[in-house]
């Protein structure tokens, strides 16, 4: 092994240190404060760390990977700022959303600024590899916008199939994880096969994560995960559970489910969860998550480097996906 | 002269032909239709042509300049889509705005898609010059967002100075013209002095154009310019005329002006125009435009190429700025 590979915490700390140094105040103050709002609240930094890990599979990380990782993190936060406007979401990371604090107009502009700032990070990458990295980045950026558009369109449709729903989730959330890994691997000098297989790993992991997220909202231990149980049910969010319930419930149960979903308020949480259980939606979700998790693990297995180097990615996937459900 | 230089119409047609070829349908349909809405309505294509002209000052245009020009045009249209949401503007280029047709959420996303598409064009540029072009592009992209933020902040302030107002206009509209010229010159192989002086030319021309735009809204011949006279006055828009009127009107006239501006409706157009004339705001605006126009012409004079090559830029500036006021 020519260089050490690092685990999540160490890479996240290393990313954070370099990332914060780049922040500086600018005028107009409201605009740049709005553009930093979410970034300062931090997140788990999963995407930038995936990018760093993908490079470390092959070579030590350089400034190029840190810059790509920063671009991906800023892009991700940009999508949250604009999505929260569209979804009229009041809270994100436990704090009021950007548009709640600064107003919708400044929030739109702040998102625009963040998207440009993502490209500012990319522009620092070695010019010999920059067009390739930009190609991957631009491609995924469009896909994420497409995913959000489908998500909004699905809100007013009751005939969304599981296949359509998986495709939407893939676009809206999975491909950015996948692209973080692909870009990291490109910057690590990986060949096309390793790039593709890491992309699949990220895609499968992302879908598994979303299924888990939907599952935990209904069936998770509220004390353990800090999220209020049934939040998705109260706001009639389309989830994996909802799509499945619509396709398996029949007769009176289906009528009851539709009646409940048309209701407002928290009193419907328990009856909806009961219907999910009666129709086996909970076990179905567990199995589906397992399927995608196993596919991700099989992808990782296939990456052509010695298995010791893959441990940080394996641990991260297990941490994100196995302990909780 | 090693290659022919072309005038506006020929370059605009050449740009249009290549630009339209790139358009193709994609899913989700609503999103990509929204992202093409303004581009299909066309505009004058002033910015891409400036970019092409700047290259032709020095060398024949190549695909790199066409791609940079396309990036600039798509970026410009992206800013219009998002600005129209913020300004709640119902009409643009004689048609309903993107958010009117597709809704605000899809319009936000469509703008995001357009910004990414601008970078898709940039990514095609020769990698040896790409980082430099991206640096100029990212810088101006942030400045345009800053300008829009100042514009919105000025709406609720009555103490905006002329200096602040010029700076806002510079950021919101001039620097993109300036950057189009700078990028074109960089791709033409121009040295730093020529790059800088062309940037100044664009900046001065942009400010002169905005002063003219404000002037014509109040004093232009409605039949000749197809715009309704006094439109800015009706919506209480901050303009060069308004900023000047506030600083020169005194006593009863100032009180009368403030009272009129607080009114709603078209009946105030004529009395406001009368106050502008009584206080010499009209002549002041003519003189100020002339000052910036002359500065732009002096800049162009200074560009170190034979004057025959500068004719298309000179004609374009005259066409945009001299005939009308």
Image: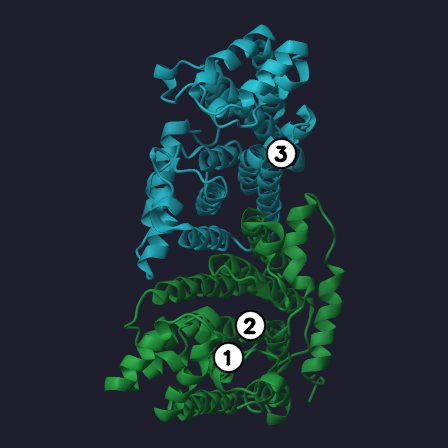
Chain colours: A green, B cyan
Q: Is residue B308 visible?
A: no
* Mark-to-mark CA distance, 3 and 2: 40 Å
* Mark-to-mark CA distance, 1 and 3: 46 Å
Q: Quadrant of residue A185?
A: bottom right
The chain letter for the residue carrying disc 2 is A
Residue A261 appears left or right of A229: left
Pick out the residue farthest to the top.
B278
The chain letter for the residue carrying disc 1 is A
| Tag of residue A180 | 2
A40 over A191 or under it: above or below: above
Q: Residue at x 55, y 71 (%)?
A: A183
Q: Are tags 3 and 2 found on a single chain?
A: no
Marks 1 and 2 in Cβ contact (< 8 Å): yes
A2 over A63 or under it: above or below: below
Could you classify mark 3 by the number of other residues whose Cα lies within 10 Å: few (under 14), some (14-19), or many (20 or more)? some
Q: Quadrant of residue B148?
A: top right
Q: Residue at x 59, y 66 (%)?
A: A92
Helix, strand, or loop for circle 3? Answer: helix
Marks 1 and 3 in Cβ contact (< 8 Å): no
Helix, strand, or loop for circle 2? Answer: helix
Q: Which residue is mark 3?
A: B154
Nearer to the camera, A5 or A44: A44
Pick out the residue farthest to the front.
A267
Q: Is residue A32 visible?
A: yes
Q: Are tags 1 and 3 found on a single chain?
A: no
Residue A8 appears left or right of B220: right
Pick out the residue farthest to the left.
A251
Q: Which residue is mark 1?
A: A202
Residue B34 appears left or right of A77: left
């Amino acid at each position: 092994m020519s260089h050490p590979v690092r685990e999540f915490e160490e890479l996240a700390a290393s990313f954070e240190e370099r990332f914060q140094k780049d922040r500086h105040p600018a005028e107009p103050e409201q605009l740049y404060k709005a553009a930093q709002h979410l970034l300062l609240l931090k997140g788990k930094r999963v995407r930038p760390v995936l990018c760093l890990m993908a490079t470390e599979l092959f070579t030590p990380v350089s400034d190029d990977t840190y810059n790509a990782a920063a671009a991906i993190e800023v892009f991700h936060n940009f999508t949250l700022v604009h999505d929260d406007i569209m979804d009229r979401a009041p809270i994100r990371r436990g704090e009021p959303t950007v548009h709640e604090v600064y107003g919708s107009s400044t929030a739109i502009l702040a998102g625009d600024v963040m998207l440009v700032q993502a490209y500012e990070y990319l522009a620092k990458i070695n010019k010999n590899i920059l067009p390739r990295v930009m190609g991957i980045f631009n491609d995924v950026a469009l896909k994420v916008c497409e995913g959000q558009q489908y998500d909004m369109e699905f809100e007013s449709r009751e005939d969304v199939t599981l296949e359509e729903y998986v495709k939407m989730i893939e676009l809206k959330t999975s491909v950015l994880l996948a692209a973080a890994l692909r870009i990291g691997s490109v910057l690590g000098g990986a060949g096309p096969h390793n790039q593709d297989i890491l992309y699949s790993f990220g895609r499968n992991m992302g879908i598994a994560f979303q299924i888990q997220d939907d599952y935990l909202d209904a069936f998770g231990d509220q004390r353990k995960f800090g999220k209020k149980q049934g939040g998705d049910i109260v706001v009639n969010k389309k989830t994996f559970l909802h799509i499945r319930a619509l396709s398996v419930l029949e007769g009176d149960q289906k009528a009851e489910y539709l009646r409940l979903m048309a209701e407002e308020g928290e009193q419907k949480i328990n009856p909806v969860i009961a219907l999910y259980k009666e129709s086996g939606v909970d076990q179905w979700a567990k199995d589906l998550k397992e399927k995608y998790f196993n596919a991700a693990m099989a992808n990782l297995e296939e990456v052509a480097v010695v298995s010791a180097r893959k441990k940080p990615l394996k641990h991260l996937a297990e941490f994100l996906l196995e302990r909780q459900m």
